[in-house]
Image (tube, coloured by chain):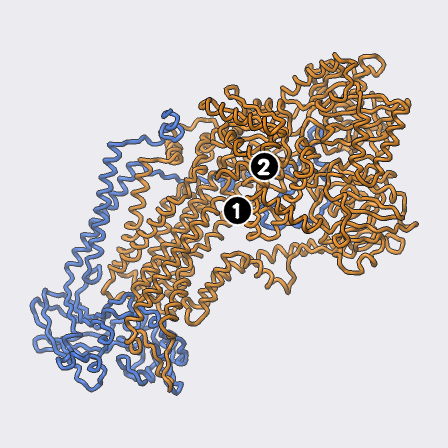
Chain colours: A orange, B blue
C-alpha cells in the first residue's frame, strides 16, 4: 500500500471516527502496541465502506447461505468471495473487492521469496528466522527494560521525580530510605511478577522453538528444529501437525490440492477450513523435480484473513490469495500431508503479530476523575505557593537576624572563611521551599489511587469471573474480563446495541419446515430414530438428530419415480449437494458406529445438510471434484462440475452437478428476493405463488428462509458455460467479476423446487432480560442483518416490541424519501407523546442517512423512541449507529454481539461484549468482556455493574479525602514552623500513611462492600439509574468531600494545637498524636460508610488501625530517632486520650448529621431499597424468574 | 473449546497447542461432559459475594441515641476537664523586658551579648492562690521556632548516645566541628542554643529549693543520652549560642540539655526547669533571682518564668473542656432537632412509594 494513500485513508478514517481518534490517542498514551489493532481495523473497514457500499449493505442478510461468515470476511478484508471454492481454478480468492489485488505490489513494499532457495532469499538478512520470542526480557536486559516499561506510567514518573528531588541535599525532606521506599516496593513487586511471567514465557518459547519439523534440504526432507526454519525453505507436514510458520501451499495429499486446516489457535473457530495448493504446483514432488519460483508477497502484517502475493513459476504468473496460505498455529486435519514454502517466519508470522493483549479503554469514571485530579493539582500548587510566599516574607522580615538566630544560624564560623551555611539568597530559598513543599504535600495527588483502582478492578473482575450466575453450562464458559479498565462503566450504561443472531438467538439452526413444489410440509415434527446407513459393516449416523415431518419422511422414501416425489427428491438432493459442507467421519465409543460430522462455516448450511440426511439424503464424501450422497441406502456419486460461490450481489450460490445418468443440472439456492427474479414464472406460476405465501408465513414467525431452484442444462448450454467458466477462472485480472458474470448468465429460467425454513431459537431468558434492561431505563437497540419481517417477529417474541407500541417503519431508497420519512416520524413522535414508539429502519435507508445531514434527524427520532430495530444492516453500519449515539450524547453505550460482523460495533461502543457462542471468536477477541449468554447482561449490568460503579465512585472520593486530609494537617503545621517544611509526623509515618496505614481498607471495601443485595438489584432494575445519573461520583460530591476534608483536617490539627499551646509538648509526641488521630479518623470515616460488615471489612479496618499503632510504637522504640519513646510518654497522659476522642467525634459529627438528614429527607432509591431489604417489606420473588432457565418458546 | 484468559493479567503465550477441539463438541446422544473439564466456578459464599454480614441501618432511634450518647459522654468530660483546669494555679512572669537595666534598653542586643555585663535580676512575684506540691517551674519562650526545619534537623542522635560516635556529626553543620576538624559534642544548633537563664527562688529569706533532678524523660536519660558521652569542644567556637556544659558530667545526667533537646512542637512552648516539692500559700511573695543570659532580644522573642501546679488534664488550659462542652452541646441540639424532624416529618423506612420511579409515576 502506498504510504501516501495510506495516510489519506487514515485521515479519512479519523474524520469519520473522531471519537475513536481521541480514543486511539488515549490508547497510545496508555499502551502503545495495542493501538495498532483497532487502527488497522479501522483502515480496513474504511476501505470497504468506500469501495463497495452496495455489496456491504446486504452482506449479512441472514436468510442466505453463509451470509454470516461472508460478512465476517467483509469486516476484515472485504473479500468478495468465499474462501472455499472449487478446485485450484477457483481457488484463487483474489477478489476485485480487495482493494490491493489489482495493484502490482511495489517492489520496495514486497518481500521476495525464492522457493526452495533459502540462501538467496535470506541473503540480505532482512527476514526474521523462525525462532520466536514471546519472552520480553533476557537476564541482562531485564532490569533496564522492565524499569523502562514500568516508568511508562505517569504516576511512577511523578513518584520518581519527587524521590529525585528529595535526594538533593537542599531539598531533602525525607531521609533517603523513606523517600524511595514506596516507589521501590511498587517497582519490585511488579518486577517480580513480570520476571515470573517472563520465565514461563521463556520456557514455552524453548519448547516451541525446539519442536521438530521436516524441511527439504538437498532434495530430501530432514528433521529440523523449528527455530532453524528459514524463509524460502520448503517444509512438509502431516495430519495433526501444527504449522510452524506461515506457508504458501505447494501440494497436498489430495490430488486437487485441498488441505483442511483448523484455526482454533488463531481465531478460536473449531470448524475445518479449506486451503488450496495452486494447480501449477500441486503435481510436483519437490524431492524429484525442483520447484523454482519466486513469490512476491506483502510485507508481514497482522491481517489473518488477508494475504496477497504473486508467484512466478515456470514463467507463469499466478496470483495467490488468503486461501493459499496456511498460518502458523493452524493444525492440518483430514489431509495426509501437505508441502509448502515458508513466506513468513517467527515473529513475522501473522499469528505472532496478532498476539498482543486485550484492547484497552479508559472508563468514563476515570475520565471524569481526571478533571478532579487537575483541580487537586491546582490545589497542591496553591498550597505550595502559599507556603513559599509566606516563607519568603518571613525570611525577608528576619533578614538581619538570620545570622545569629539560634534556630537559623545562616553563617558557618567553623571554617577560617565565614560562609553562608545552606543559604543561597532569598529567591533561591523561596524556590527551594516551593519544591520542598511539593515533596511534603506530594500525596495530595493520589498516585496510590491509580494503583488502588487497578487492584480493585482485579478484585471486581475476580468476582465477575467467579459469579456462577454468569457461567454458561452449554458452552462451558465463564464470564471473561478482557479489559480491566472499564469495570465501572458497566454501571452507567444507557444504550445497549445488540446483534440478533447468536446473541438474542442461539444460532443453532434447526430445520423446521419445507415448502416443496407448492406444498407446505409444516405439520407436527416428530423425533425420528435417526437415519443411518451401513458402510463396511459400520453404522454411520449423522451427528445431529433432526426432527422430521412424518408425511414428508414417507414421501421422501418413494424415490424420484412418481411425479410428486420427484420434487421432493430434487429438493433434498439440492440441500445435500448445493453447499460447501465437508463431511467428516468420527469414531465413537461404540466400534461399530461412526458419526458423520458436517463441518462448514455456515450453521444454516449445516442444518440443511443434517435435515437432508434425516430424510435419507446423506452426504458422505466431498472432494473438489465429486460428492457422494447416500440416497435412501443407495450410494450415488455426482460430479461437481462447477460451483458459483455465494456473493452478496447475487445473494445465492449454485452448483453444477453431473448426475450418474449423464445429465447435468444447475442447482441454485438463495434468498427469496434474488431467487424470484431468476425463476421462470411462466411455468408453474401457481407453485411460485404458493411458495411465496409459505415464505411469508415462515418469516412472519421468525424463520430464516431459502429458496431452491433447479434447471437441467442441455449439452450446448453446458459446453458454453464450461468454456466461459474455464476462461473466467484462469483470468489473471478481474476473475471474480468474470466468474460472477458467468454465474448470472447461467442462473436463469430456473424451475422452482421449494423453500426451506430454519428456526433460530431465542436464547433462554432473553425476553426477561430485555424486560429488565428496559425497566433499568436502558435503551435496547437491535441491529441485525435479518429481513425486516424476521426482525420484527423476533422483536415481538423477545418482548422488545409490544402491542401497545406505535411502529415507525423507514424503508427508503433515496435520500429525499429518507429525509421525508424521518420528518414524518418526528412529527408522529411529538404528536404521540405518551405511547411508546418503536423505530424500524433498514440498512438501505441507513446508507443515505448515516454520514449525511440526516444523521441529526435520525438521532432526534431515535432518542424519542423506546425501541429501535435496525434490519439488514452491514457491520460498518452497526458501528455507525453506535457512533451516532456515542458522538451526540454523553450516555454510555454498550454493544453486544457474537460474530465477526459485530466486531466494528463492539469496538466502537464504550463497552463491547462478545458472546462466546457458535460463531467463532472474533467478537470475543475484540470485546472488553465475554460471556456465554445474552441474559447474563442482566446480572452483569444490574448487579456487578452497579456494584462496580458504586464502589469505584466511592473509592475515588474517599481517596481524595484520605490524602487531602493528611496533606492539610501537614500544611497547617507548616504555618507554625516559620513556613519551613517541618513535619511533626515522622517521615516514616508520612510515607507509610498512604502505603500501609490506610490503603488496605480502601481496597478491601471497594472490592467487597455491597450497597444492595443481588436480589434487590434484580428485583428493582430501576435502581440501576443511580449509575446513569452519576450519583456516586459527581462535582457536587467532590466539593462536599473537599469541604468535609477541610473541616476534618482543621479538627485534627487544631485540637492538639490549642490543647498543647504553651505546654512542654515536644514535636514527636504531638506528631504521634496527629498520626494516630488522622489514621483513626479516616478509618472511622470509612467505617461510617460501609454498608455490609463482613469479617473481611472488620479485619481490614480495625486491622489497619492496629497496624498503625504497632508501626507508631515501632518507630518510637528506635533510639536513634528523635522521637524515641514519645508515644509512651504521650499515652501516659490523659490529655492525649481526651484529644484523640474529641478529634474523632468532632470531625465526624457534621458529616454524620448531614448524612442522616439527607437519608431521612431526601432518601436515594438505594437508601430506600436498603431499608426495605433490612426490614423486608417489599421484596417480591420476581428475581427467580430472571435467573431460571425456564423459558422455552 | 474455549481458552479463558484468567483476568488477562498473566500473559498467555499465543502458542499453538494441539487441541482436540471438534471432538468434544456435543454428541448426538448428549454424552455428558466430564465434570473435570467443567469451568463452572465453584460455589463459595466468598466468590458469590454472599459472606454473612452485619448490615447496620441507622434508624431514627439509632440516630437520636447516638447523638444523645455523644452528648452524655462529652458534656461530663467537658465539665470535669474545665473544672480540673480551673483548679490549676499558675504564675506567669515575663521578665525579658524588666530584667534589662534602663541604660541598656536602647541597645538590648549589646547588653545581652556582652559577657561582662551583670545579668542578675531580682524580681518579686505573688502567689495568687494556694498551690499544692509539686509545683512545676517552667521557662516559657515565645516566638522561638524550635520546630524550624533547619533547627530540628541539626543534631546527631548517634553522637549523643555513644562515645564512639563522636565523629558522626552529619547534619550538625554549622556547629559540627571546630576549625581543626575536632568534633563538637554535643553537636548541632539545638545543643548550641541551650537555654541558660537560671532561676533561684527565695521565700521569706529562705531559699526555695528547686529540684532539678528527674525533669527529663527516663527513656532519654537511660537510653538516648549516653552515660559515657562527655561534652567536648562545646561552646568553644567564636559564636556562643547559649549555655555551657560541665565537661565532667556525662550527657545522660545533663538534664537541662536533655529537656532542651526534646524540641518543642510549637513556637510558644514551656520547658520544665525543676520542681518545688512544697506547698505555697496564697499571697506569699516569692523573690526570683535570675540570671538573664539567654538572647531572645535579637528576634523579639519573649521569656517567661512559670510556676504551675498540675492536674490530670495537664496545665491550665480550658480549651479541651470548652471543646467538649461545645461538641456535647451541639450533639444534644442535633438530637433534639432530629427528634422534631422525625416527629413532624416522619418517613416509614423502606417505603416503596418514596422510590424515585414511584414518585415520578404518581406525579403524572
- Whether residue A968 sits left or right of residue A672 in the image: it is left
- Whether residue A1081 sits left or right of residue A865 in the image: it is left
Residue B91: percent from left, percent from top: 14, 67
Q: Can residue A540 be seen at all in this image of the molecule?
A: no
Query: On the image, which quarter does residue A440 sit in?
Result: bottom left
Q: For mark 1, does the 10 Å Cα neighbourhood hold few (<14), some (14 to 19), or many (20 or more) residues?
A: some
Disc 2 target residue: A851
Residue A1188: percent from left, percent from top: 54, 28
Residue A1089, compared with residue A224, is above or below; it is above
In percent of the image, x 51 and y 50: which residue is there? A454
Badge 1 marks a residue whose secondary structure is loop
Residue B213: percent from left, percent from top: 23, 74
Q: For mark 2, does the 10 Å Cα neighbourhood hold few (<14), some (14 to 19), or many (20 or more) residues?
A: few
Residue B153: percent from left, percent from top: 36, 71
Q: Earlier in the sequence, mark 1 or mark 2?
A: 1
Q: Badge 2 sits on which subunit?
A: A
In percent of the image, x 48 and y 60: which residue is there? A158
In-front residue for pair A110/B70? A110
Label 1, label 2: how many angstroms apart (C-alpha)? 26 Å
Residue A770, compared with residue B300, is above or below; it is above
Disc 1 target residue: A362
Q: Give the total of numbered labels.
A: 2
Residue A237, compared with residue A419, is above or below; it is above
In-front residue for pair A91/A633? A91
Amino acid at each position: 500500500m502506498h504510504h501516501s494513500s495510506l495516510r489519506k485513508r487514515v485521515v479519512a478514517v479519523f474524520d469519520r471516527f473522531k471519537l475513536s481518534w481521541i480514543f486511539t490517542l488515549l490508547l497510545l498514551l496508555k499502551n502503545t502496541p495495542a493501538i495498532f489493532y483497532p487502527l488497522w481495523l479501522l483502515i480496513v473497514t474504511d476501505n470497504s465502506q468506500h469501495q463497495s457500499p452496495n455489496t456491504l449493505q446486504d452482506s449479512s442478510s441472514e436468510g442466505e447461505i453463509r451470509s454470516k461468515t461472508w460478512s465476517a470476511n467483509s469486516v476484515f478484508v472485504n473479500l468478495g468471495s468465499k474462501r472455499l471454492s472449487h478446485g485450484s481454478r477457483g481457488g484463487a480468492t483474489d477478489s476485485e473487492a480487495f482493494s490491493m489485488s489489482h495493484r502490482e505490489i511495489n517492489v520496495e513494499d514486497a518481500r521476495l521469496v525464492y522457493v526452495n532457495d533459502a540462501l538467496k532469499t535470506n541473503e540480505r538478512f532482512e527476514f526474521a528466522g523462525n525462532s520466536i520470542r514471546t519472552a520480553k526480557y533476557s537476564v541482562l536486559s531485564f532490569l533496564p527494560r522492565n524499569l523502562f516499561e514500568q516508568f511508562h506510567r505517569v504516576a511512577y514518573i511523578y513518584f520518581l521525580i519527587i524521590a529525585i528531588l528529595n535526594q538533593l541535599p537542599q531539598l531533602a525532606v525525607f531521609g533517603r530510605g523513606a523517600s524511595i521506599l514506596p516507589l521501590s516496593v511498587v517497582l519490585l513487586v511488579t518486577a517480580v511478577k513480570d520476571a515470573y511471567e517472563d520465565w514461563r514465557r521463556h520456557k514455552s518459547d524453548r519448547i516451541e522453538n525446539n519442536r521438530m519439523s521436516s524441511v527439504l534440504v538437498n532434495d530430501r526432507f530432514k528433521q529440523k528444529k523449528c527455530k532453524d526454519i528459514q524463509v524460502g525453505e520448503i517444509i512438509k507436514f502431516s495430519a495433526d501437525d501444527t504449522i510452524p510458520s506461515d506457508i504458501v501451499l505447494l501440494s497436498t495429499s489430495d490430488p486437487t490440492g485441498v488441505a483442511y486446516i483448523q484455526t482454533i489457535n488463531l481465531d478460536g473457530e473449531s470448524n475445518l477450513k479449506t486451503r488450496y495448493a495452486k494447480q501449477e504446483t500441486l503435481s510436483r514432488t519437490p524431492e524429484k523435480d525442483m520447484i523454482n519460483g519466486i513469490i512476491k508477497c506483502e510485507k508481514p502484517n497482522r491481517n489473518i484473513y488477508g494475504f496477497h502475493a504473486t508467484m512466478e513459476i515456470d514463467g507463469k504468473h499466478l496470483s495467490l490469495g488468503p486461501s493459499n496460505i496456511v498460518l502458523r498455529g493452524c493444525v492440518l486435519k483430514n489431509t495426509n500431508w501437505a508441502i509448502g514454502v515458508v513466506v513468513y517466519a517467527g515473529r513475522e508470522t501473522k499469528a505472532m503479530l496478532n498476539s498482543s493483549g486485550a484492547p484497552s479503554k479508559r472508563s468514563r469514571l476515570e475520565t471524569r476523575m481526571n478533571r478532579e485530579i487537575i483541580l487537586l493539582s491546582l490545589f497542591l500548587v496553591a498550597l505550595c505557593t502559599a507556603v513559599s510566599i509566606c516563607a519568603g516574607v518571613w525570611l525577608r522580615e528576619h533578614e538581619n537576624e538570620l545570622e545569629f538566630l539560634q534556630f537559623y544560624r545562616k553563617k558557618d564560623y567553623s571554617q577560617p572563611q565565614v560562609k553562608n551555611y545552606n543559604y543561597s539568597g532569598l529567591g533561591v530559598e523561596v524556590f527551594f521551599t516551593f519544591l520542598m513543599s511539593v515533596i511534603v504535600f506530594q500525596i495530595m495527588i493520589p498516585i496510590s489511587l491509580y494503583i488502588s483502582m487497578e487492584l480493585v478492578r482485579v478484585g471486581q473482575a475476580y468476582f465477575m469471573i467467579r459469579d456462577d450466575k454468569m457461567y454458561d453450562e452449554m458452552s462451558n464458559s465463564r464470564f471473561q474480563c478482557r479489559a480491566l479498565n472499564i469495570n465501572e462503566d458497566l454501571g452507567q450504561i444507557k444504550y445497549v446495541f445488540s446483534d440478533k443472531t447468536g446473541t438474542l438467538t442461539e444460532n443453532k439452526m434447526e430445520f423446521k419446515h419445507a415448502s416443496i413444489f407448492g406444498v407446505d410440509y409444516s405439520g407436527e415434527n416428530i423425533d425420528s430414530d435417526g437415519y443411518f446407513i451401513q458402510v463396511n459393516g459400520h453404522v454411520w449416523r449423522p451427528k445431529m438428530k433432526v426432527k422430521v415431518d412424518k408425511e414428508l419422511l414417507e414421501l421422501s422414501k418413494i424415490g424420484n419415480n412418481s411425479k410428486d416425489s420427484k420434487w421432493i427428491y430434487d429438493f433434498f438432493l439440492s440441500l445435500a449437494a448445493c453447499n460447501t459442507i465437508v463431511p467428516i467421519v468420527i469414531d465413537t465409543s461404540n466400534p461399530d458406529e461412526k458419526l458423520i460430522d458436517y463441518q462448514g462455516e455456515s450453521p444454516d448450511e449445516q442444518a440443511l445438510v443434517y435435515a437432508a440426511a434425516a430424510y435419507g439424503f446423506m452426504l458422505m464424501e466431498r472432494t473438489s471434484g465429486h460428492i457422494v450422497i447416500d440416497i435412501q441406502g443407495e450410494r450415488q456419486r455426482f460430479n461437481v462440475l462447477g460451483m458459483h460461490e455465494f456473493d452478496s450481489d447475487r445473494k445465492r450460490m449454485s452448483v453444477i452437478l453431473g448426475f450418474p445418468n449423464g445429465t447435468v443440472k444447475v442447482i441454485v439456492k438463495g434468498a427469496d428476493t434474488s431467487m424470484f427474479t431468476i425463476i421462470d414464472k411462466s411455468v408453474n406460476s401457481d407453485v411460485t405463488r404458493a411458495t411465496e405465501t409459505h415464505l411469508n408465513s415462515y418469516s412472519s414467525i421468525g424463520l430464516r428462509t431459502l429458496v431452491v431452484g433447479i434447471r437441467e442444462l442441455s449439452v450446448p448450454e453446458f459446453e458454453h458455460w464450461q468454456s466461459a467458466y474455464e476462461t473466467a477462472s484462469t483470468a489473471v485480472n478481474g476473475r471474480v467479476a468474470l466468474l460472477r458474470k458467468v454465474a448470472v448468465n447461467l442462473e436463469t429460467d430456473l424451475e422452482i423446487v421449494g423453500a426451506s425454513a430454519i428456526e433460530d431459537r431465542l436464547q433462554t431468558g432473553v425476553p426477561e432480560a430485555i424486560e429488565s434492561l428496559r425497566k433499568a431505563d436502558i435503551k435496547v437497540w437491535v441491529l441485525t442483518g435479518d429481513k425486516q419481517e424476521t426482525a420484527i417477529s423476533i422483536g415481538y417474541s423477545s418482548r422488545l416490541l409490544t402491542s401497545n407500541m406505535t411502529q415507525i417503519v423507514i424503508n427508503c431508497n433515496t435520500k429525499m424519501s429518507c429525509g421525508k420519512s424521518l420528518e414524518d416520524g418526528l412529527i408522529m413522535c411529538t404528536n404521540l407523546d405518551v405511547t411508546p414508539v418503536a423505530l424500524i429502519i433498514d440498512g438501505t435507508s441507513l446508507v443515505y442517512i448515516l454520514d449525511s445531514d440526516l444523521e441529526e434527524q435520525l438521532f432526534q427520532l431515535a432518542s424519542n423512541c423506546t425501541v429501535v430495530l435496525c434490519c439488514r444492516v452491514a457491520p460498518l453500519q452497526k458501528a455507525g449507529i453506535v457512533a451516532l449515539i456515542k458522538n451526540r450524547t454523553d450516555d454510555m453505550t454498550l454493544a453486544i454481539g457474537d460474530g465477526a460482523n459485530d466486531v466494528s460495533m463492539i469496538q466502537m461502543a464504550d463497552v463491547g461484549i462478545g458472546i462466546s457462542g457458535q460463531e467463532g471468536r472474533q467478537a470475543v477477541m475484540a470485546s472488553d468482556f465475554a460471556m456465554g449468554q445474552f441474559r447474563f447482561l442482566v446480572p452483569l449490568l444490574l448487579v456487578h455493574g452497579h456494584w462496580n460503579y458504586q464502589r469505584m465512585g466511592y473509592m475515588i472520593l474517599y481517596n481524595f479525602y484520605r490524602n487531602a486530609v493528611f496533606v492539610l494537617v501537614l500544611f497547617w503545621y507548616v504555618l507554625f514552623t516559620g513556613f519551613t517544611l517541618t513535619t511533626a509526623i515522622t517521615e516514616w509515618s508520612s510515607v507509610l500513611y498512604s502505603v500501609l496505614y490506610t490503603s488496605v481498607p480502601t481496597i478491601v471495601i471497594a472490592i467487597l462492600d455491597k450497597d444492595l443485595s443481588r436480589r434487590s438489584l434484580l428485583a428493582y432494575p430501576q435502581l440501576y439509574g443511580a449509575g446513569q445519573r452519576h450519583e456516586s461520583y459527581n462535582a457536587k460530591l467532590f466539593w462536599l468531600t473537599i469541604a468535609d476534608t477541610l473541616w476534618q483536617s482543621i479538627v485534627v490539627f487544631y485540637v492538639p494545637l490549642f490543647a498543647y499551646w504553651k505546654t512542654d509538648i515536644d514535636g514527636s509526641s504531638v506528631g504521634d498524636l496527629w498520626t494516630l488521630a488522622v489514621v483513626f479518623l479516616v478509618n472511622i470515616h470509612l467505617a461510617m460508610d460501609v454498608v455490609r460488615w463482613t469479617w473481611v471489612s472488620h479485619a481490614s479496618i480495625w486491622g489497619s488501625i492496629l497496624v498503625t499503632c504497632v508501626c507508631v510504637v515501632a518507630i518510637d522504640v528506635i533510639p536513634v530517632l528523635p522521637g524515641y519513646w514519645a508515644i509512651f510518654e504521650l499515652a501516659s497522659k490523659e490529655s492525649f486520650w481526651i484529644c484523640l476522642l474529641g478529634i474523632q467525634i468532632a470531625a465526624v459529627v457534621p458529616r454524620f448529621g448531614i448524612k442522616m438528614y439527607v437519608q431521612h429527607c431526601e432518601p436515594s432509591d438505594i437508601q430506600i431499597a436498603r431499608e426495605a431489604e433490612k426490614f423486608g417489606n417489599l421484596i417480591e420473588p420476581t428475581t427467580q424468574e430472571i435467573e431460571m432457565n425456564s423459558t422455552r418458546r | 473449546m474455549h481458552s479463558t484468559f484468567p483476568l488477562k493479567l498473566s500473559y498467555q503465550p499465543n502458542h499453538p497447542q494441539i487441541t482436540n477441539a471438534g471432538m468434544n463438541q456435543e454428541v448426538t446422544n448428549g454424552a455428558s461432559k466430564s465434570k473435570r473439564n467443567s469451568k463452572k466456578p465453584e460455589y463459595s459464599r466468598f466468590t458469590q459475594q454472599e459472606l454473612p454480614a452485619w448490615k447496620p441501618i441507622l434508624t431514627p432511634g439509632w440516630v437520636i441515641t447516638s447523638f444523645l450518647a455523644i452528648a452524655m459522654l462529652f458534656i461530663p468530660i467537658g465539665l470535669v476537664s474545665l473544672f480540673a483546669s480551673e483548679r490549676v494555679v499558675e504564675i506567669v512572669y515575663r521578665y525579658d523586658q524588666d530584667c534589662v537595666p534602663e541604660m541598656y534598653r536602647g541597645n538590648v542586643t549589646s547588653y545581652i551579648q556582652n559577657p561582662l555585663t551583670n545579668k542578675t535580676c531580682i524580681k518579686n512575684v505573688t502567689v495568687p492562690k494556694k498551690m499544692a506540691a509539686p509545683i512545676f517551674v517552667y521557662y516559657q519562650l515565645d516566638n522561638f521556632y524550635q520546630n524550624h526545619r533547619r533547627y530540628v534537623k541539626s543534631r546527631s542522635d548517634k553522637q549523643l548516645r555513644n562515645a564512639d560516635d563522636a565523629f558522626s556529626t552529619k547534619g550538625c553543620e554549622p556547629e559540627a566541628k571546630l576549625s581543626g576538624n575536632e568534633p563538637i559534642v554535643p553537636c548541632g544548633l539545638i545543643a548550641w542554643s541551650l537555654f541558660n537563664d537560671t532561676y533561684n527562688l527565695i521565700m521569706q529569706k529562705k531559699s526555695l529549693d528547686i529540684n532539678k533532678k528527674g525533669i527529663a524523660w527516663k527513656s532519654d536519660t537511660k537510653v538516648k543520652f549516653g552515660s559515657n558521652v562527655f561534652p567536648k569542644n562545646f561552646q568553644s567556637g567564636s559564636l556562643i549560642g547559649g549555655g555551657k556544659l560541665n565537661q565532667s558530667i556525662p550527657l545522660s545526667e545533663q538534664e537541662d540539655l536533655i529537656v532542651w533537646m526534646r524540641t518543642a512542637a510549637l513556637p510558644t512552648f514551656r520547658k520544665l526547669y525543676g520542681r518545688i516539692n512544697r506547698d505555697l500559700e496564697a499571697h506569699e511573695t516569692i523573690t526570683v533571682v535570675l540570671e538573664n543570659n539567654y538572647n531572645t532580644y535579637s528576634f523579639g522573642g519573649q521569656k517567661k518564668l512559670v510556676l504551675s501546679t498540675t492536674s490530670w488534664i495537664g496545665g491550665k488550659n480550658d480549651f479541651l473542656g470548652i471543646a467538649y462542652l461545645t461538641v456535647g452541646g451541639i450533639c444534644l441540639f442535633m438530637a433534639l432537632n432530629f427528634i422534631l424532624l422525625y416527629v413532624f416529618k416522619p418517613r416509614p423506612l423502606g417505603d416503596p412509594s418514596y422510590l424515585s420511579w414511584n414518585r415520578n409515576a404518581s406525579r403524572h
